[in-house]
């Protein structure tokens, strides 16, 4: 659930706004009828936030999970001395 305040009301009732945010609400602040800011609780973990965003993208159909989950990344080519070659080419 989202609540909305004008800028004047949000300033006047800031403690109440923070209580609502702590309770899980997302508070929208508007200026002259236009929404300008959202106040929401800080996420505890960046990993949890990323997982929530990925799940939201999956639900909306913007990303599709892989059919198999045992995919391994493999190096396409391994050539030792790549940094030395790069630096030598850069100096030319």
Image: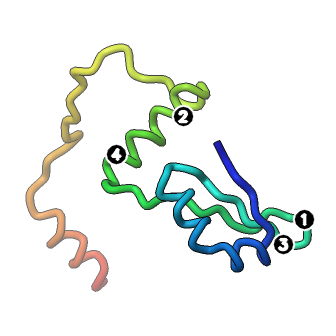
Mark-to-mark CA distance, 3 and 1: 5 Å
Q: Mark 1 points at which residue?
A: 33
Tell me which residue sits at (10%, 64%) in the image: 81
Which element type, helix, strand or loop, lies under badge 3?
strand
Point out the image quarter for the C terminus: bottom left
User: How many numbered marks appear?
Assistant: 4
Q: Cβ–Cβ below 8 Å for labels 4 and 1?
A: no
Mark-to-mark CA distance, 2 and 3: 30 Å
Which element type, helix, strand or loop, lies under badge 4?
helix
| Crowdedness near tag 2: few (<14), some (14–19) or many (≥20) residues, C-alpha within 10 Å | few
Q: Name the residue under label 4.
A: 48
Mark-to-mark CA distance, 2 and 1: 30 Å
Foreground tag (2 vs 1): 1
Which element type, helix, strand or loop, lies under badge 1?
loop
Q: Name the residue under label 2.
A: 57
Tell me which residue sits at (65%, 62%) in the image: 38
Q: Mark 3 points at which residue?
A: 31
């Amino acid at each position: 659930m989202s609540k909305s305040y004008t800028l004047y009301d949000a300033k006047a009732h800031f403690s109440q706004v923070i209580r609502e945010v702590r309770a899980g609400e997302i508070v929208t602040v508007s200026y002259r009828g236009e929404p300008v800011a959202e106040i929401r609780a800080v996420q505890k973990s960046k990993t949890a936030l990323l997982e929530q965003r990925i799940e939201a993208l999956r639900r909306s159909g913007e990303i599709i999970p892989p059919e198999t989950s045992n995919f391994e990344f493999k190096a396409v080519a391994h050539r030792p001395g790549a940094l030395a070659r790069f630096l030598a080419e850069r100096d030319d």
